[in-house]
Image: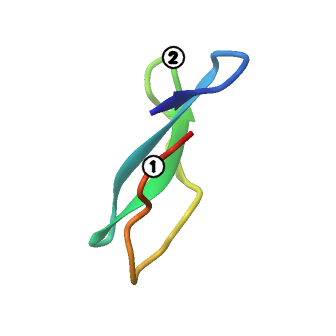
């Protein structure tokens, strides 16, 4: 999990399909979720 410098967004690992990918969302209300990766042959190991 990683917080943006301005504190308005958070990046996390989450299941997209059957693999762990990076998604971002607004910290206020945890809304406007957007997948920024879409790997389907391997998992993302970390967010930093």
Q: Nearer the viewer, mark 1 or mark 2?
A: 1
The extreme left residue here reads 18
Name the image colouring: rainbow
- Residue picked out by circle 1: 46
Q: Nearer the viewer, residue 45 or 28?
A: 45
Residue at 51% from the left image edge and 44% from the top image edge:
47
Residue 46 higher or lower than 41, as above or below? above
> Could you classify mark 1 by the number of other residues whose Cα lies within 10 Å: few (under 14), some (14-19), or many (20 or more)?
few
| Camera-nearest residue between 14 and 2 | 2
**Quadrant in which the C terminus appears:** top right
Q: Which residue is mark 2?
A: 28
Residue at the right extreme? Answer: 6
Image quarter of residue 3: top right
Q: Position of residue 21 (x, y in %)?
A: 44, 59
Give the distance between the C-alpha atoms of the residues marked 1 and 2, in whole angstroms.
23 Å
Q: Residue at x 51, y 16 (%)?
A: 28
Left or right: residue 21 compared with residue 6: left
Q: Which quadrant of the figure contains the N terminus?
A: top left
Which residue is painted at 27% across and 72% down in the image?
Answer: 18
Query: Residue 6 placed where, x, y %?
Result: 72, 16
**Point 59% across, 57% down: residue:** 36
- Is residue 47 at all visible to an observer of this figure? yes
Q: Is residue 32 visible?
A: no
Position of 23 relative to 25 (above/below)? below
Q: Is residue 6 left or right of residue 10?
A: right
Categorize mark 2 by other alpha carbons within 10 Å: few (<14), some (14-19), many (20+).
few
């Amino acid at each position: 999990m990683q917080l943006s410098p301005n504190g308005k967004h958070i990046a996390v690992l989450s299941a997209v399909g059957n693999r762990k990918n990076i998604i971002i969302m607004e910290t206020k209300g945890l809304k406007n979720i957007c997948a920024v990766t879409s790997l389907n042959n391997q998992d993302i190991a970390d967010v930093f």
